[in-house]
Image: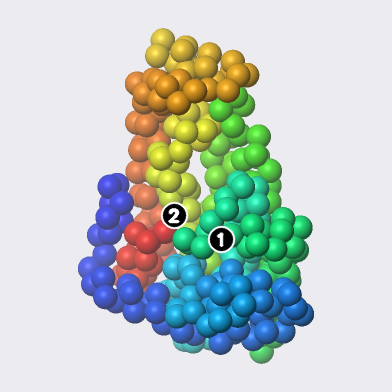
């Protein structure tokens, strides 16, 4: 992956898509067993959220989501010389957790649609959507406890639960990290490390664990995923206008160009569209966008440096362009 977001891997795009489709195919039966084991109406709600059926359980073609996180588990296992097929339950558990976080994210953000369809909370209510998110996380843990090796199961549960706690902390900080509360850049990075990077890092570490890799290799793959997640968050925030890294870098630049956007952000009053556009322009002038791009460049370089073997991990590098 280069600084402009493209991939330097010599792996053809069709191979990357094969990883995605293989991960999806391997995870699907595990996911369906987990969902079908839930009581109603949770099972119907979960299948709807995953794109398997409509509100009345009328079957739909395909499923929602890219399965990139599952593919990272899959590719990490392969990169460590293991049988990727053994990673299927772990990859499915990660997808269950990720799906649960999307439910909670929709509620917190008030998003009424998800993937072109009505969000679960807009149909079954906020309380039920929150409970379904909790149920999906529980299903993920149950899936891991069914792993044939109890030692691997315990380690996998511990890693996944640790990343979930990091994610909660990141979300907690993100709720306060709004335009009027923009803090130092390092505060933003701590938030992003929890909100985004923790689970992506967990995916890569769990893939190595599934391949029975050594502790050093597991740690290296997890670092790769975390740096990848931070790079993604930096680039993703270029399109946002709340107190993301772009705004934080600008407001803390102490430049003359930062005075007006800081005043707008701290005014406490609702900003009209024109004010938002003006503030966004001034943030760019105050070096906010430049700082974000620099951060993304550094993170992308760090992702490659963290890999234990660049040749055997070329599929991971190729997959990184999809995050």
- Report the residue at 68% width, 84% height from top: 36
Residue 55 appearing in the image: yes
- Report the residue at 46% width, 84% height from top: 25
Residue 95 locus on image (x, y percent): 56, 70
The numbered disc on residue 62 is none
What residue did someone put label 1 on?
118
Q: Is residue 194 above or below residue 7?
A: above
Q: Quadrant of residue 322?
A: bottom left
- Label 2 neighbour load within 10 Å: few <14, some 14-19, many 20+: many
Q: Quadrant of the C terminus?
A: bottom left
Q: Quadrant of the N terminus?
A: bottom left
Looking at the picture, tell me which residue is in the foreground, 133 or 10: 133
- Label 2 secondary element: helix
Report whether 192 appears left or right of 314.
right
- Report the residue at 62% width, 40% height from top: 174
Q: Quadrant of residue 303?
A: bottom left
Q: Is residue 222 above or below residue 74?
A: above
Q: Is residue 128 above or below residue 71?
A: above
Residue 21 locus on image (x, y percent): 39, 79
Residue 163 locus on image (x, y percent): 64, 59
What residue did someone put label 2 on?
228
- Report the residue at 41% width, 62% height from top: 307
Looking at the picture, the colour scheme in use is rainbow
Which is more foreground, mark 2 or mark 1? 1
- Label 1 secondary element: strand
Residue 187 locus on image (x, y percent): 59, 34
Q: CA distance from mark 2 to mark 1?
A: 30 Å
Looking at the picture, tell me which residue is in the foreground, 78 or 19: 19
Report whether 92 appears left or right of 77.
right
- Sequence order check: which comes first, mark 2 or mark 1? 1
């Amino acid at each position: 992956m280069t600084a402009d977001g493209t991939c330097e891997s010599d792996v053809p795009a069709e191979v990357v898509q094969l990883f995605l489709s293989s991960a999806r195919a391997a995870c699907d039966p595990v996911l369906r067993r987990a969902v079908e084991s839930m009581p109603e109406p949770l099972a119907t709600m979960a299948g709807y959220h995953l794109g398997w059926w409509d509100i009345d359980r009328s079957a739909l073609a395909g499923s929602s989501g890219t399965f990139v996180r599952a593919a990272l588990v899959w590719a990490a296992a392969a990169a460590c010389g293991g049988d990727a097929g053994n990673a299927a339950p772990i990859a499915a558990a990660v997808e269950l957790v990720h799906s649960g976080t999307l439910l909670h994210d929709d509620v917190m953000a008030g998003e009424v649609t998800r993937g072109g369809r009505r969000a679960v909370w807009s149909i079954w209510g906020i309380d039920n959507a929150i409970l379904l998110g909790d149920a999906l996380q529980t299903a993920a843990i149950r899936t891991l406890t069914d792993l044939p090796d109890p030692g691997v199961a315990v380690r996998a549960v511990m890693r996944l639960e640790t990343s979930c706690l990091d994610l909660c902390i990141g979300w907690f900080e993100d709720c306060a990290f709004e335009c009027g509360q923009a803090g130092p850049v390092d505060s933003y990075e701590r938030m992003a490390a929890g909100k985004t990077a923790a689970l992506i890092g967990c995916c890569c570490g769990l893939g190595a664990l599934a391949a029975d890799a050594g502790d050093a290799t597991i740690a290296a793959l997890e670092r790769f995923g975390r740096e990848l997640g931070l790079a993604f968050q930096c680039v993703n925030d270029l399109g946002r206008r709340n107190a993301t890294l772009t705004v934080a870098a600008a407001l803390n630049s102490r430049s003359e160009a930062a005075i007006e956007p800081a005043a707008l952000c701290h005014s406490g009053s609702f900003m009209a569209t024109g004010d938002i556009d003006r503030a966004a322009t001034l943030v760019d002038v105050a070096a906010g966008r430049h700082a974000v791009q620099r951060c993304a460049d550094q993170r992308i370089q760090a992702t490659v440096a963290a890999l234990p073997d660049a040749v055997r991990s070329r599929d991971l590098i190729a997959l990184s362009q999809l995050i």
